[in-house]
Every structure is written in structure tokens, then in C-alpha cells.
Amino acid sequence: MEVRAVTKYVRISPEKARHVARLLQGKRAIEALGIVNLIPKKAARLMSKTLCSAIANAENNFDLDRETLVVKEATVGVAPTMKRFRPKARGMAGRILKRTSHFKIVLTSD
């Protein structure tokens, strides 16, 4: 049985969030939650919310035990980028890209 949780339009760069997502794949859900809570990064805090949501979905919707859950897939996708401009020297403008992400966590019962 596969259980998933998706968080969309998270205001963090996908490149930064993928560092945390790679640590979670293949781990038990409880162990992954402990790892994420100890990492001092914004991406870890945001990924923790998605992981907690996936665990809650498994417990409440499918009556699965949280001890048997394993993180099958933790991916970070690219979401729309906000484009902003900052004034530069000699009347020019520099472009600023504010990137966003989509988090997806899939848990499977062992």
C-alpha cells in the first residue's frame, strides 16, 4: 500500500531542498522524521511537515501502523518562479529569480 503527501508552491529553491530529500529515501518513516528534525535547514523544517502529513494520512485513512512505514520516494520538483527586478548601475535592471518547489513523499507499508 502506498500513501502520499504533496506540498505545493513551497518558497525554497529546489536545489537546496533536494539535499534534504536525498537523506530520506529508503529510511523508515520514524527514523526519517528524527533525521529531519535534527537538520538545521529551512528545507528540513518544510520537509518535516510533508512527512508528518504522509504519516498522518497512512494512520488515519488506511489504518497503517507508523512503525511499519518506509519512505519509498521523496522528491522535490520545480514550481513556478517569481521574477523580480532590482535597480543596477547606469539605469539598468538586474533580474532576481525567486524559486519555488513542490514536495512529494510516498510511504509504503513494509
Image: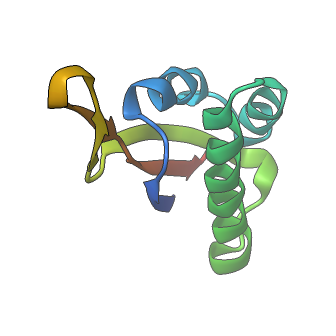
- Residue 56, position in %: x, y? 72, 66
Give the number of marks: 0
Between 1 and 7, the one lying in front of the other is 7
Residue displayed at 78% across by 54% down: 66
Residue displayed at 64% across by 28% down: 27
- Residue 70, position in %: x, y? 62, 40
Q: Is residue 31 above or below residue 59?
A: above
Q: Residue furthest bottom?
A: 61
Residue 59 lies left or right of residue 50; in this view the side is right
Between 43 and 51, the one lying in front of the other is 43
Quarter of the image for residue 92 reads top left
Q: Is residue 83 above or below residue 61?
A: above
Residue displayed at 62% across by 59% down: 54
Residue displayed at 36% across by 42% down: 98
Figure quadrant of the C terminus: top right
Quarter of the image for residue 35 reads top right
Residue 10 lies left or right of residue 102; in this view the side is right
Between 11 and 56, the one lying in front of the other is 11
Name the colour scheme: rainbow
Residue 36 lies left or right of residue 10; in this view the side is right
Can residue 1 be seen here? The reply is: no
Can residue 41 be seen here? The reply is: yes
- Residue 65, position in %: x, y? 78, 59
- Residue 60, position in %: x, y? 72, 77
Q: Residue furthest front?
A: 90
